[in-house]
Image (cartoon, coloured by chain):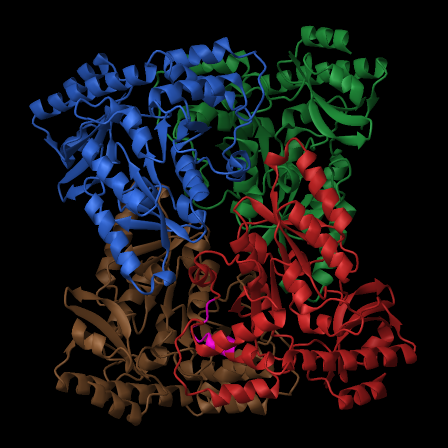
Chain colours: A blue, B brown, C red, D green
Amino acid sequence: MLSFESDYTTGAHPYVLQRLIDTNLISQPGYGNDEYCASARERIRAACQCPEADVRFLVGGTQTNSTVIAMALMPYEGVISATTGHIAAHEAGAVEYTGHKVLTIPGHEGKIRADELTDYLETFYADGSHDHMVQPGMVYISHPTEYGTLYSLAELEQIAAVCREYHLPLFLDGARLGYGLMSLRTDVTLPDIARLCDIFYIGGTKVGALCGEAVVYTKRNTPACFVAQIKQHGALLAKGRLLGIQFDVLFEDDLYFKISRHAIEMAEKLREMLTRKGYRLFLDSPTNQQFVIVDNDTLASWKDKLAVSFWEKYDETHTVVRFATSWSTTEEDLAALEKIL
Amino acid sequence: MLSFESDYTTGAHPYVLQRLIDTNLISQPGYGNDEYCASARERIRAACQCPEADVRFLVGGTQTNSTVIAMALMPYEGVISATTGHIAAHEAGAVEYTGHKVLTIPGHEGKIRADELTDYLETFYADGSHDHMVQPGMVYISHPTEYGTLYSLAELEQIAAVCREYHLPLFLDGARLGYGLMSLRTDVTLPDIARLCDIFYIGGTKVGALCGEAVVYTKRNTPACFVAQIKQHGALLAKGRLLGIQFDVLFEDDLYFKISRHAIEMAEKLREMLTRKGYRLFLDSPTNQQFVIVDNDTLASWKDKLAVSFWEKYDETHTVVRFATSWSTTEEDLAALEKIL
Amino acid sequence: MLSFESDYTTGAHPYVLQRLIDTNLISQPGYGNDEYCASARERIRAACQCPEADVRFLVGGTQTNSTVIAMALMPYEGVISATTGHIAAHEAGAVEYTGHKVLTIPGHEGKIRADELTDYLETFYADGSHDHMVQPGMVYISHPTEYGTLYSLAELEQIAAVCREYHLPLFLDGARLGYGLMSLRTDVTLPDIARLCDIFYIGGTKVGALCGEAVVYTKRNTPACFVAQIKQHGALLAKGRLLGIQFDVLFEDDLYFKISRHAIEMAEKLREMLTRKGYRLFLDSPTNQQFVIVDNDTLASWKDKLAVSFWEKYDETHTVVRFATSWSTTEEDLAALEKIL
Amino acid sequence: MLSFESDYTTGAHPYVLQRLIDTNLISQPGYGNDEYCASARERIRAACQCPEADVRFLVGGTQTNSTVIAMALMPYEGVISATTGHIAAHEAGAVEYTGHKVLTIPGHEGKIRADELTDYLETFYADGSHDHMVQPGMVYISHPTEYGTLYSLAELEQIAAVCREYHLPLFLDGARLGYGLMSLRTDVTLPDIARLCDIFYIGGTKVGALCGEAVVYTKRNTPACFVAQIKQHGALLAKGRLLGIQFDVLFEDDLYFKISRHAIEMAEKLREMLTRKGYRLFLDSPTNQQFVIVDNDTLASWKDKLAVSFWEKYDETHTVVRFATSWSTTEEDLAALEKIL
C-alpha cells in the first residue's frame, strides 16, 4: 500500500545506517560522552553560527518537549502555547504530568501572534489576583507548526521581542525543522532561529533519523545537572552514541538540508498534482505536510491503496486529510499516487 | 472601612465559636476520628437525604478541588471544566501540580452546557488519535459558579445524564453552596445535588465557618486509603475536630441554610439598591455575589471608604467589580453602603 | 477516659479562643494579608531576634514539610533526613508526591549526626556516577525529634556548619518546638535556631493552637511567588486571619513559652511517677513525649481507662507506648493517672 | 584503549543492523503498530511459553522502570526494592519524580530475601498508624542484580509467594536478563520468570540492541490506555519499528540466548584469568559483570590502556572496579587484557 500517512513511516537515511555499521564495534563511553555526540554537537553549533550553543540529544518529540519545558520552568510556572500546539493537544498531557500547566492563547493555522501574546501577558500582570494563577514561564512555538505553516522572520522577531520584554524564554519545537528551513517560501534560517530562540530543537525522527532530537541551548542556559535531570525523566540513553552518530551524519555535508529540500520538492509536486486533479486544499502549507479536503466517498475508495492521515471532520460529507512527504518520498511514489488520484 | 469585598472577610458564625469553647477541653482522637466529625457526618447525610453518603472534611476550597480530583482520576486522565472554572483559572495550577490536565470547554457566565459537553466527548472519541490525548476522567462544575450564577435542575440533570452515559463522575464545587441553595431563584435542592453528583462539597469557609469544606461521596465511591491520600496531599488535620465541630454546628437546626438565606436577602437588597442608584449590573446573579460595572472615577472615589473586588476591566473608563454579601452582612452595612453609593 | 495519647487531643488555649471571638466581626483582607498575621509576624521576628526574618503561616505539619521542601528544592534534588524522620516515615509519601526523594541517613533516637552527614555528602560527591543519583538539596531535622529527643547547641552548630560547607539549606521541623525550647535539659534558644537554620517552623497545632505552623525564613530566602506556590499546594487559607490571630496570641506575653513550660513540668512529673511506679523508660526524653516499655497485660488492663499511643512492639510480651503531655495537661490528669498506674 | 567498562560501549549485533537495512524503506505505521513489533511480540511470547503475555517495547532501562512502576501503582502506593536496587540508588529519582516512594529493604549482594520482605509487610500492616505511611504496591527485583548476582528458582518462588499472599505484583528488572538466563550457575528459565513475575522486561540495550527493552505483562495485566500513558511519560517512539525490528532479530533463532551465552563464556574466562593473576574478587558473580578489588597503584597504571568501571572505594589503598563482558567481547579482547594484567 502506498503511504503518504506521515513522515515517520520508513527507517533512516541510508548514510545514517551505513555510519551505524562503520562505527559499530568501536568502544565508546555511554550516556552521550562518546566522540560522535561531540562531533555532532560541533557541526550543529557551526550550522547555527552560534559557537556558544550547547547541544544535547534526546530521543523523541514529546519526550523532548516535556523534558525541556519541565527543566526550564519553576514549579509554579506554566508554558504559553497555541491551543493547537502539540504540547497542548497531542502529547497525552506529558507537560501536565510534570506538574506544569499549558497556558493557551489562540492559534492561527497553528501560529501564535505577537500582539495576542502581549495581550495575554498584559492582562495577566494587570490582574490583581494573578498570584492565584499560574505564572507564565516560557513561550512555546512550533516551526513548522502542526498545520505545516511557517513563521516569517518578522513574526519570529516580534514574538522574540515580546519574550525578551517579559523575560520569558522562547522555545521552538522543530520536530520538522528541516522541512521548514528548506521551504521555498521562508525567509528564516537556522542562524536566525539560534539567534531568536533561547532553546529549540532540530528534529531527527521525522527528517532522516531512526530517532533523536537535537536540543540547542543558545544562551549559555543549559539547565543545571542536565544528565541527572534527563535521567530522572527517563530520557538518558545508555548508548548515547545512537543519537550522536545519526546527527553527526545528518550535519555532515549538509545532508539534513539536502534531504529536507528533497521532501519539499516532492511536496510541491504533490500540491501541484492535488490542485491539478481538482482537490481542494484545507490551508496553504509551504512545507512537507499538505492538508486536503476530500469527500468521504473518495476517501473510502482509497482504503486499500493509499494511506493518508485523518486530520479532522470537515463537514458531513467531507474530511480533512494530511499527506506528508519526507526524505524518503520518491518520484515513483508520486507517480503511483497520481494513478490513484 | 466598609467591606463588601468577599464572603470571607470576617470570622465564623458566633454559634460555631461558642461550640469551640464548649468542647475545648474534651479529649478526642485526632485525624477526623472524633465524635464531632461523626455527628456532623450524620447530620449532613440526613440533610442530603442520602443515607449511604460518605462525608469527609477538608480545609479549604483549592485544597479540596485538587485533592478530590487527583484521587478520582487515573494518572492519564484529565478533568473537564469551563474555561472560567475556578480550577482552570484561579487555583495557581493546583490540579496540574498533581499531574492532571484541566480540559476546558466554553463557560457561559460560568456554566457549561450539556450539549457542548456531549460535543466535546463525541469529538474526542471520534478522533482516531485520541490515545495521544488526555483522556477525560471527570466533569467539574461549580454551583454557584464563579459568576454567582446557578444551574437549573433541568440543566443539572442533563449534565448528569451525559456524565452517566460516558461513565464520567460529576463533581460539583460547592464552595458557596449555601448561597446557591437559598437563592430565591433556584429549583435545585441539596438532595437533588446528592442524587445527581457523584462527589460534591459543601463550602464552610465562605458560609459561616473559619475554614472547612465537607466533601460528600454519594455513590459508595470514597477513594481507597482516603486518610493516607489526603495526608499525602497535606490535607489531613491533626485536630480534625476543628472541622467536625464547625459542620456539626452548621448542620444543627438548619443553621447553614438560615445564614445562607440571610446573605441572599442582603444580596437582594443590595442589588435593588444598586439598580435603584443607577448602577449597571454586569450579569444577573441570583446569589450572594453581585457584579457591577462602575466608572473608574466612581471606583477611585470609594478608595478609603468601601472595599469591593476588582473583577475585570470592562472598557477604558469602566471596571467590573464584585460586591459580596455573607452570613455576617448586616442591615447597618447596607445603610452605610447606601450613603457611599 | 483519661488521655495521654498525644498533644493534639484537646482544642486551643483559652486565650486563643477568646481572641477569635474578640476579632470575629472585624473585616480583614483574605489570604494572610490581615493585620493579625502582620502583628504575629512582627512578634515572632522579635522572639527570634531576627529582624530580617520572613514569617509565613501554614495549616499543619505534613503540609508545611512537603510545601516548604518542594519550594526549596530544584526538581532534581532530594532532602536528607534521618530514616526515622517524620517526612521519611510518617507522612504518607507527601514529599515524594511532589517529585522529590527523601535521602536517608541513620537516625540515633531520631537525631542525625554531623559526621555521618559529612560522610554521606563526601561519598556522594566522590562517586563518579553521582549524576545518575538524586542530588542532595536540603537537610531536614526535627527538634524535638519524633522520639522527643533534642539536639544540643553544639550538635546543631556542627550540623549547620556541614550544611553551610555544602551549600545546603538547613530546615528544622519544629512541630513541637515549644516543648523543646522549654525543656529543662536544653541549651538551645529560639534565636539560636533562627541563627543556625535557613528555614524552620514553630508548631502551633501541638502547642496551644487549633491548627497552624509558623514558617520562618531567616536568610532573606522566602521562595519566589510564595502565595501562588502555597495555593498550588492547597495550603493557602482564604481566612488567613485564623492563623494570624492564633500566633499573635501565642507570641503575646510569651504565652507560647509559658504553656510549653507547663507541659514540660507535667512531663517531668509524669516521668518521675512512671519511674517511681517501676515502669521502664524506652529512652530518655527531655520533652513532652515519654516512651515507656509496658508489658502487654498491663497495657490490656488500661483499655477502657487510659489512652496512650502504640509506638512499636518491644518483644513478644512488651510494647513501647508513648505518653504525651501538652499545654492542657492538668495536675488532676496526673493524679488520675497515678491511680491507674 | 581496551574497554571492559560496561556492556553498552559498542553498537548492536550485526544481524540487528542488517535487518534495519533490509527493512529500511518499507512503510509501516508508527507508534508500535508495525509488523516487526507484532512479530517480535509473538516470538517473545513463544520464548516465554506464555501465550497470553502482552509484550510492549520501551526505549531504555530507567525509562522502563519508572514508567512501568508508575503505571502499576496507585498514587498513594510505593514500590519495595533492595536499598541497592537500581531504582533506589542510580536512577536519579525517576520513580520519585512520578510521585511514588521507593520503600527499601536490605539488599544482600543486590538480592532481597523473602523472609525480610514478609517481615516488612507484617510490620507495616501491624502498625496502627500505617494509614500515615506509604502503602506498599509492588515488589521490584533485578535479575541479574546490580552486583551481577542471581536468584535461584527457589528464592524467586518464595518471593513470588509472598507477593501473591499480599496481593503485590512482582516486577523483575531484566536489563541484563540474557546474561542471567545463560549463566552457567542458574536454574531459572525464561518461562519460570514469566510464570512467577507479573511484569518483567527483557533488556535489549545491554544485550545486542542499540536500545530497547521488551516489557512482558504475563497476567493479562497491561495497564489501561497504555499508549496514552507511555506517551505521557515521553516513552512512545514515533518509529516504533526501531524497537520491533531489533527484538524480532534477537528472538529469531535464539540469537538473544546465543549472544548472551557468549558473553558468559567470556566472563568465565575473565574471572579465571583474574583469579589466576592473583586478583581478589569482591563477590562471586555468575554473570557478565565481575567485581574485583584492585590496589590503587595498579588501577592508576591502567589509566590509558584499560577502561573499567569504578564501583566503590574498598579501603584507603584499594578500590572495587567492575569488568563487564558483553555479546561483543572477543577472545582478542581477553588476550589484550591478559597482557595488561
Q: Residue at x 63, y 20 (%)?
A: D257
Using the image as rendered, state which of residue A87 and residue C111 is in the foreground: C111
Percent across and percent down for residue B330 are 32, 91
The segment highlighted magenta reads C236-244
Q: Is residue D284 visible?
A: no
| Vertical side of C12 occupied by D270: above or below | above
Q: How many marks?
A: 0
| Vertical side of B79 occupied by B8: above or below | below
Using the image as rendered, state which of residue C337 and residue A34 is in the foreground: A34
Q: Residue at x 59, y 76 (%)?
A: B239
Q: Is residue A72 magenta?
A: no
When asked about the image quadrant of residue C17, the answer is: bottom right
Q: Quadrant where the C terminus of chain B lies? A: bottom left
Using the image as rendered, state which of residue A200 and residue A298 is in the foreground: A200
Percent across and percent down for residue A161 are 26, 41
Percent across and percent down for residue A173 are 33, 34
Q: Is residue D307 visible?
A: yes
Q: Is residue D289 left or right of A335 when viewed as pictured?
A: right
Q: Quadrant where the N terminus of chain B lies? A: bottom left
Using the image as rendered, state which of residue C307 and residue A246 is in the foreground: A246
Q: Is residue C243 magenta?
A: yes
Q: Residue at x 25, y 55 (%)?
A: A122
